[in-house]
Image: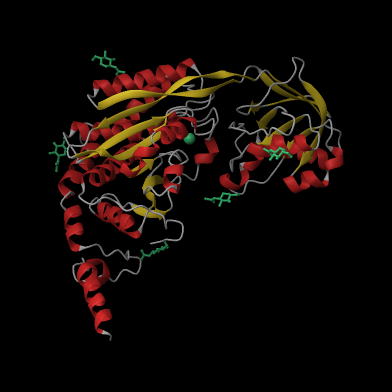
Amino acid sequence: MQKRVFQKYLILCLTFLCLSDLSALKSKNKNKSKCVLPRNLAREIDSYKPILKDIKNMTTNGFFHGLTFNELATFVNKFSSRISGSKTLERSIDYMLEKSKNMSFDNVHGEEVMVPRWIRGKESVKLLKPLVKNIPMLGLGYSVGTPQKGITAKAVVVRSFSDLILRANEIPGRIVVFNQEYVNYNETVKYRSQGAIEAAKFGAVAVLIRSITPSLEYIPHTGMMDYNVNVTKIPAACITVSDAQYLNKLADEDKEIIINLKMNAKTYPNVKSRNVIAEITGLIKPENVVVISGHIDNWDVGQGAMDDGGGAFISWSALALLKYLGLKPKRTIRTILWTAEEFGLIGSSHYINIHKLKEPNLQFVMESDAGTFTPLGLQVSGTNLVKCIIERIFSLLKPEVNFEINDKAEGPDIDSWINSGVPGASLWNANEKYFWYHHTKADTIDLENPEDLDKGTALFASVAYVLADINIDLPRNKLVIKERI
Ligand SMILES: *[C@@H]1O[C@H](CO)[C@@H](O)[C@H](O)[C@H]1NC(C)=O
Ligand SMILES: *[C@@H]1O[C@H](CO)[C@@H](O)[C@H](O)[C@H]1NC(C)=O
Ligand SMILES: *[C@@H]1O[C@H](CO)[C@@H](O)[C@H](O)[C@H]1NC(C)=O
Ligand SMILES: *[C@@H]1O[C@H](CO)[C@@H](O)[C@H](O)[C@H]1NC(C)=O
Ligand SMILES: *[C@@H]1O[C@H](CO)[C@@H](O)[C@H](O)[C@H]1NC(C)=O
Ligand SMILES: [Zn+2]
C-alpha cells in the first residue's frame, strides 16, 4: 500500500470506524440498520433518553394524554368548513393564534398571504335518460359554473385519456364522464386535475370525473383542478365510483345517456389569509430552526379532521408539550400551520419564497399531511447521517414504541424545501384508508383516534427537540434522490 493511501485510510479509520459505535454491526438481526454513527454523536443522542422518556410518559400517563384529540375535536367542531378565502378559515386562524399566545409561545403571529376565494354554490347532477336519477356530486375547486339552467347534454363515458383521444370525434358538445381505474392517488389524480383540460381540447362542454379513491363508499370526493389558458374552461365535478361505473355500464349497453349538470361555482378576487407561526425560540442559535407543520385549511365539506386537522394539531401539541415540560432547545422550534394548501400550496409557497434567504438556517423541516392514523415512524429525506441520527432517536423510544424510517419525505407543503436540499420528514402512518375519506363529508373527528394522535405528538416532539438541541448542524441532502439506507 502506498504510504499516502495508507495514511488516508488511517485518517478515515480514525474519524469513522475506530470512533464508531459498533453495536449495530454486531447484531445478528439481518434487518438491523447499517447505521454507524461516530461514537460521540451516538452518546450525545443517547443522553436525551430521560427527556424522551418524559415526553412519552406525558402523552401516555400525563397531562397530554388524549389532549391532542380533545383540542382537535373542539377545533373541528367549532370551525368545520375552513375553505380558502372563507371567514371561517380566518376565525380558525385567530383562534389558533390566541391559543398560541395563551400557551406563551414565542413570536406568535400570522404571516399574511393572498389566497383564492372560490365558492361552490348550489350544484347538482341529474341523469335524464335512459332514466331519471339524481347523482351525488361535488364540484372541483377552481371550476367555473354552468348557466342558471345548467348544461344538458349527451354523455360519453371514457376510461382513460388514451380512450378519450380514440373517441375524439364523439366529444364535441358532450359531457365527458371519466371512469378511470384507481391505481394510486399520485397516479390517478391527474384525471381530476387535468380532466377538464383534456376533454375541452376535443370540444366537451363539461366533465364528470370518478372520485379519486380506492373506496366503494357512496360519497363523492372533491379536490382541486387546473385549467389551461389555451382551452375553454368547462365545468368539472366528481361523482361516486359507483355512479361512474353505472354510467359506464349504460354506455356499454349502447343506451343514450343525457345528463343535466348545474353548478353555481364562482371564483372571486383573492383575499388575505395568514400562515400561523408559533415557536419556542432557541437559547443558543435562535436563527437556526426546526419546523413542524400541517395545514389549517380544508374543503368546504366534512370537518377536515384527517386532512389536515390531525397534522396541524400534532404539530401544535408537540410544541405545547415541549413548552409544558419547560424545555429550551439550542435552536428554535417553529410550528407552522399553513393556509390554503388545498388550493395549490398557496400559504407554504409564499412563506418559502419570502424567507428564501433564511433557508440555509433550517436544521430540519417536518410535515404531517397524509393522515394521523397509527404512526409507524418518519419518511425521511436526508443523507445517511441524518437518517441514522433519527433512527438513533427512535431507538431511545423503545420498547413501548417502535418507530422506523421509510424513504423519502412526502409533504406537499415542505416539498420545495426538500427539493432544494433541506433535510426533512413527513409522518409515516398506517394510512391505508386515508384516501377513502379524503376531501369528503366523511372526513370528520370520528376517523381520529386519541392514542394515535398522542403517539404522533410524542414523535414530532421527540424528533423536533433532539434535532433542535443537538450540537451537529445537519448536512444538506443534495444526493437525496440517489441515496438510500
Ligand atoms: C425484515 O424486514 C422485512 C421487510 O420489511 C420483514 O418482512 C421481515 O419480517 C423482517 N425480519 C425481521 C427478522 O425483522
Ligand atoms: C409519568 O407521569 C405521571 C403523571 O404525570 C407521573 O406521576 C409519573 O411519576 C411519571 N412516571 C415516570 C416514570 O416519569
Ligand atoms: C385564552 O385564554 C383566555 C383567558 O384564560 C380564555 O378566555 C380564552 O378562551 C383562551 N383562548 C383560547 C382560544 O383558548
Ligand atoms: C407520481 O406520479 C408521477 C406521474 O404520474 C411520477 O412522475 C412521480 O414519480 C410519482 N411520484 C411518486 C412518489 O410516486
Ligand atoms: C398555449 O399555447 C402557446 C402557443 O401555442 C404555447 O406556447 C403555450 O405553452 C401554451 N400554454 C399551455 C399552458 O399549454
Ligand atoms: Zn392535506
Q: Is residue 26 above or below residue 296?
A: below
Q: Is residue 359 left or right of residue 210?
A: left
User: In the figure, residue 332 lies in which quadrant?
Assistant: top left
Whether residue 447 can be seen here:
no
Q: Is residue 114 left or right of residue 359?
A: right
**Location of the N terminus (image quadrant):** bottom left
Q: Position of residue 274 (x, y in %)?
A: 41, 23
Q: Nearer the viewer, residue 76 or 447?
A: 76
Whether residue 184 can be seen here:
yes
User: In the figure, residue 109 lies in which quadrant?
Assistant: top left
Q: Nearer the viewer, residue 429 or 338?
A: 338
Q: Is residue 247 above or below residue 90?
A: below
User: In the figure, residue 116 lies in which quadrant?
Assistant: top right
Q: Position of residue 18 (x, y in %)?
A: 19, 71
Find the residue positioned furthest to the bottom.
1
> What colouring style does the render use?
secondary structure
Q: Is residue 265 left or right of residue 375?
A: right
Point 73% across, 28% down: residue: 234
State the count of labels: 0
Q: Nearer the viewer, residue 82 or 127?
A: 82
Point 29% across, 21% down: residue: 99
Q: Is residue 239 left or right of residue 397?
A: right
**Location of the C terminus (image quadrant):** bottom left
Point 45% across, 30% down: residue: 347
Q: Position of residue 338 (x, y in %)?
A: 42, 30
Q: Position of residue 405 (x, y in %)?
A: 36, 54
